[in-house]
Amino acid sequence: MKDSTGLVGGIAALALALGAVQAHAAVPQDAGAPLRVLVNPGDAGEHSRFGVYSAWRGALEQALRKHNIGPVTFVLSVDATADLSSTRAGTNDIFVAPAHVVGSAVRYGYKPVLGVDKPVQAVLVTLKNSGIQDLAQAKGKRLGMPLQDSVVTYLVRGEVNAANTTIKRHFASVYDTRYQEALLPCLHLRHCEVVAVERAVYERWVAAGEPVLAIMETRPVPNLSVAIKDGTRPGTEALQAALADSPVFANLLRTEKSLAVAHRADDFKYVATLGYFTPRALPGATVVDARRVAQLMQEGAAYVDTRTDAEFKAGHVPGAVLVPYHEKSAKDADFDASLDKFEVAKLGPDRGATLIFACNGPECWKSFKAAHAAIKAGYRKVHWFRGGFPEWRSSGLKFDAAAAQ
C-alpha cells in the first residue's frame, strides 16, 4: 500500500522506531470512558506505516465527530500477535487491521464495517529452475517469510497445518524478515529456496521479468478493514455511512486507487479458521469443555489462567489463579519452550493435583504451552480447557470482572 498521506520517510521511520504511537483525539465529549481505536497497517506500506495510520485515523476521526462521539484514543500497532489477543479480551472498541486480526475480532463480538477492495492472497514462490513444483517437493528446503504476525505468514502457516505438517517440520530452516521485498534477494542468493509473499508482490516480480514460480496459494482474504465492537456507538451501519461521506476517507481511496467494500462476518470465515489455532489434542492432557471445568472445580481442581494481568482483571473464572505464560515462541506444535517464561513452581509441589489450564480460546496458545510445561514437569492430572474464558463466558456461566470505573 502506498503512503496515504505523503509524509516524509523520516517521520515514518521514527514511528516504526518507537514501535507504537499513542495519540489522543479531542472530538466532542460524550459520557463514559474514551473510545479506543487501534490501527494496524499490516504488511502493506512497509515503509509508510505511519502514513497509513494517519490516513485511517483522520477518516475515523471525521466519521466519529459526525456522531458527536468522543473522547477517542487512537493507537498505532505493529504487533498483530498482541492485537489477536486483544480481540479476545475486547480491550479495543474499533479495529482497523489486516484480515487475520479482524477475523479474530469477528469471532469475539465485533462486527465488520468496510475495507479497501484489494483482497490479499499469500503465495509460496520459488525460482523456475529450482525443480520445486508444489508444497510436497518443498519439504526439507529453506523457507523465507515475513515475521510471524504477518497476514502472509498467518495464511501460509494455516495452509501448511491443514496439510498435516508444520513449518518447522516441513522446512529445513526459516528466514524471517519484516520486508517482503527482501525475500527476492534471498531467492537469488540461494539463502532461501522457497519464500512466502503477497500475490501482489509476486506479480510485481513477474512483471519485472524475475524467473519466479508460484507453487502454492491461499484463498484471498480482505485487505485492511474496520470492525467495531458490538454495542459501541455509533454502530456498524452508522459508522459505515459516516465513512462513506468522509472526504478524508474518499481521499484515502483515491490515493490507493481503490474502492470501499462493505464486509460481512462470512468474509472472514476462512481466515478465522487458519493461522495459529491450537491442536485439538495434547498428549498427556485431557481436553475439557466449560461444563466439565465447572464440575472439576467443584471437586477441588485448580483453574490456572495463563493470560495477562490486564486480561485477567477484565474478566476471569471465579476462583481462577493467575499464572501468566510469557510467550515469545512460535504459535505451533513445534514451539521452542526455551524462548518462553512460565513459573511452573507456582503450580504447587503436588504432582497429583488436578490442574486446568486455560487462556483465551482455540487461537490462544498460552494454555497449550503451559499444560505442556506441567506435563513435562511431572504433573499427572492435567486438563486443558481449549475453549478458555470465551467459552466459559458464552456458556452463560458466572464470571468475575473488574468493577466499572
Image: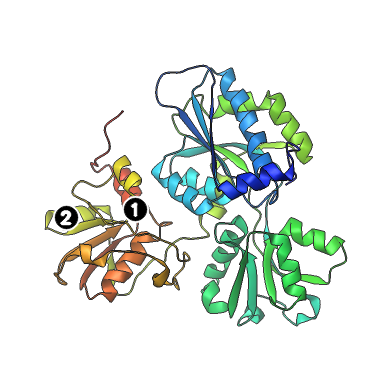
- Determine which of the numbered discs, if any, sits on residue 2 in the image: none
Q: What element does badge 2 sit on?
A: helix
Residue found 58% across the figure and 81% down from its top = 172
- Return the residue nearer the eye: 15 or 129: 15
User: In the rendered view, does 345 fall on the left or right side of 187?
Assistant: left
Residue found 14% across the figure and 71% down from its top = 352
Give the label, 1 or 2, closer to the camera. Answer: 1
**Colour approach in the figure:** rainbow
Residue found 52% across the figure and 73% down from its top = 166
* Label 2 environment density (alpha carbons within 10 Å; few <14, some 14–19, many ≥20): some
The amino acid type found where label 2 is placed reads Met
Q: Give the vertical position of 233 relative to 266 (above or below).
A: above
- Return the residue nearer the eye: 107 or 182: 182
Residue 149 in picture, x, y percent from top left: 55, 57
Residue under label 1, please give it: 307
Residue 61 in picture, x, y percent from top left: 59, 26
Residue 401 in picture, x, y percent from top left: 27, 38
- Determine which of the numbered discs, if any, sits on residue 297 in the image: 2
The amino acid type found where label 1 is placed reads Arg
* Label 1 environment density (alpha carbons within 10 Å; few <14, some 14–19, many ≥20): many
